[in-house]
Amino acid sequence: MIASTMCFALSGIHGEPVAVEAYVTGGSTYQFVMVGLPDTAVKESRDRVTAALKNSGFTMPFGHTTINLSPADLKKEGSVFDLPIAISIILASRQIKPAEDISNLLLMGELALDGRLTPVNGVLSMVIAAKERGINKVILPWQNANEVIAVEGMQVYPAKSLYEAVQHIAGKMPILPQVQKSYQECIGAQRISADLEQVRGQAFARRALEIAAAGGHNLLMVGVPGSGKTMLARCLPGILPQMTQAESFETTRIYSVSGLLKPGEGLMTERPFRTPHHSSSVAALIGGGANAMPGEVSLAHNGVLFLDEMPEYPRSLLESLRQPLEDGTVTVSRVRARSEYLSRFMLVASMNPCPCGYYGSRVKPCRCGSHEIRKYLDRISGPLLDRIDLQVEVDNVPIEDITAPAQSENSLTVRQRVSQAREKQHARFQGTSIRCNAQMDTKQIESLAQVTPEALKLLQSAMQRFGFSMRAYGRLIKVARTIADLRHEERIDAASMAEAVQFR
């Protein structure tokens, strides 16, 4: 007897359909064969499935059992196939009869030896892929149900055990479907972890932070130790606009595939803030490993990648950021896998002006020589600095500003202005894949930036005076466009351009 169920395999963050076929026939000896390019974790499912069947009140057929994972040329990895394999065996051995056609039912989940269903990685990617192919029902471990709660048009049946899943398919004890939520309901309880009202003084840096958030620009803060650079960086996610449903799905899929979503955790609605240590490898930052897993640049997608004390990072590590910053995607190739991941993030970095940290400080003298300072600053290459739109100096906050009773603007107030500027950009780039000013290319700068003759003359003067590169020329126009959006100006005037040059 042959029976088939539907599952999905992961290829990067994308799901690929896999038919799990079981063929059960009699024989004098017990044989269990699995074909279809399974990895070690899939092969080991034989023992898990055998124990789970017996401990759930079912029997493992005696004789020859063949499991085929089709298509056979697609690598199958992980423990997600346990549940569909077990149910295929039960159906093929005629231990139950399905109450309805199950060709439109997605099955996934790892089995414990006692038949319990345990969570697996990549559930959101597989459910989205199934929906795109017309599959609208899924049985999955109950701990993974929150992850797909905002996928519209999908009937989600959270199961706690193999027995529950089988009884549901047989129509004897149907599982109640999960009540799906709209995305707006999911983001309703969002909180801000680091609020700007905790920051005292630093008006210039706060303004740079607001401009960076409004246009999606990269930011470098240079200042003495203890001046608040790290605290300012941690406040950035709180003033960024709330993620759209598409952005939330993109980010959650990356975290789900990486195994970073805790059991029971739902859709990610807060923008990620990643802070890799300076001892991280290139593979950890860009992505890699035997299975070509996402790196920090992809985990920061739609959020912030913060490099604290940027010169302390190896030069090779910093140079590897250049391609993801330009393209917004990164391709990870390994012997066993090749995957492409999204990596559209805001780079925020901090650094001291010199090895001792007090060059140019008003409160403490610098003890570094000119050669030491130059050697320290040369750890960051010109091409990488060229890709950072806003570069600001941050000094110690005077004691009178720290002790002043006046409250600073909170993050929600700043976020309102940032969101208004982003709405203007959304209307400007309607029909394109661009989401903010920082992503404009040369053609869009020429057609959409709308620079006044006075502003263009000021930019030309700045280019000659400071020796900016052609890349800096385009980035200055992008920053000026964002400043004009914050000021509700249709065109980039001289004042907006002057402020953009000031932040360079």
Image (cartoon, rainbow, N blue to C red):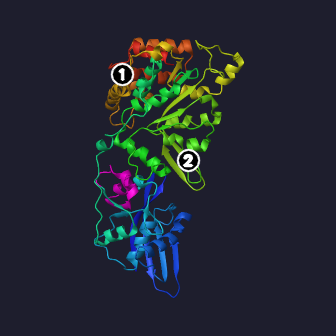
Q: Is residue 478 visible?
A: no
Asked which quadrant contains residue 456, the reply is top left
Q: Nearer the viewer, residue 7 or 356?
A: 356
Q: Is residue 334 above or below residue 164?
A: above
x%, y% of residue 166? 35, 71
For marks 1 and 2 on the same chain, the one whose residue lies earlier in the sequence = 2
> Dot 2, how many residues are within 10 Å of its Cα: few (below 14), some (14-19), or many (20+)?
many
Q: Nearer the viewer, residue 192 or 87?
A: 192
Residue visible at 38% across and 47% down? 267
The alpha-carbon separation of the residues under discs 1 and 2 comes to: 37 Å
Residue visible at 47% across and 68% down? 69
Q: Which residues are magenta?
A: 127-153
Q: Residue under circle 1?
A: 486
x%, y% of residue 490? 32, 20
x%, y% of residue 281? 62, 42
Q: Residue under circle 2?
A: 332
**Does the magenta portion include 317?**
no
Secondary structure category for the residue under label 1? helix
Furthest residue toward bottom: 28
Q: Amino acid at mark 2?
A: Val
> Dot 1, how many residues are within 10 Å of its Cα: few (below 14), some (14-19), or many (20+)?
many
Q: Amino acid at mark 1?
A: Leu
Secondary structure category for the residue under label 2? strand
